[in-house]
Amino acid sequence: MPNVPSVTVNDVPADVTLLDVREQDEWDAGHAPEALHIPMSELAGRLEELPNDKDVYVICRSGGRSARVTAYLNGNGWDATNVDGGMQAWDVAGKKMVSESQADPVVI
C-alpha cells in the first residue's frame, strides 16, 4: 500500500468531512458526533455522498481500513487524509463521542 497522508486525532481540523468507514455495529456503539458514516464495504457505491469541495478525513477503529480508503479516495480525485489510531485514539484523547443507543458511547 502506498503511503497515505495521515494526522493524529488532535490534528483533525474542525471544518472537514470526517468519514467513518466502520461497520454499522461499530458506528452504533460510538462515533464522533459530526462524522459521516459510510461503511468501507459500501463506499464505492456511495461516493456521491462525499463532498467535492471539502477535505475528507477518514477514520475507522484503529487506522487500517481508513488508510486503505484514504488511498482509494486520493486515487479517485478526493483530497483525503487518514486519522492515525482511529476511534481508539479518538476515545483515548477524550474527544466527544455519541452512540445510537441509550448506552454510553464506546469503541468496539
Image (cartoon, rainbow, N blue to C red):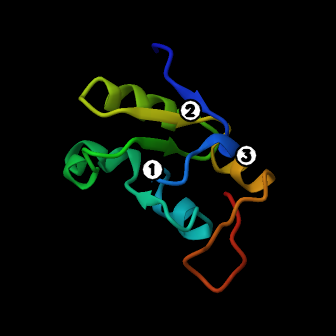
Q: How many marks?
A: 3
Q: Dot 1 lies on which element?
A: loop
Q: Amino acid at mark 3?
A: Ala
Label 1 environment density (alpha carbons within 10 Å; few <14, some 14–19, many ≥20): some
Picture quarter with the C terminus:
bottom right
Residue 25 numbered mark, or none: none
Residue 89 numbered mark, or none: 3
- Residue at x 78% of width, y 51% of height: 93
Question: In the image, 65: left or right of 42?
Answer: right
Q: Are marks 3 and 1 in contact (CB under 8 Å)?
A: no
Q: Amino acid at mark 2?
A: Gly
Label 2 environment density (alpha carbons within 10 Å; few <14, some 14–19, many ≥20): some
Distance Cα–Cα, label 2 vs label 1 = 20 Å
- Residue at x 34% of width, y 46% of height: 54
Distance Cα–Cα, label 2 vs label 3 = 13 Å
Q: Dot 2 lies on which element?
A: helix
Question: In the image, 4: left or right of 11?
Answer: left
Disc nearest the viewer among 2 and 1: 1
Residue 73 x %, y %: 33, 32
Residue 105 x %, y %: 69, 71
State the residue lying farthest toward the top: 2
Residue behind mark 1: 16
Q: Amino acid at mark 1?
A: Val
Question: In the image, 31: left or right of 10?
Answer: left
Question: In the image, 105: left or right of 82?
Answer: right
Label 3 environment density (alpha carbons within 10 Å; few <14, some 14–19, many ≥20): some
Residue behind mark 2: 64
Task: Name which quarter of the figure residue 9 lies in.
Answer: top right
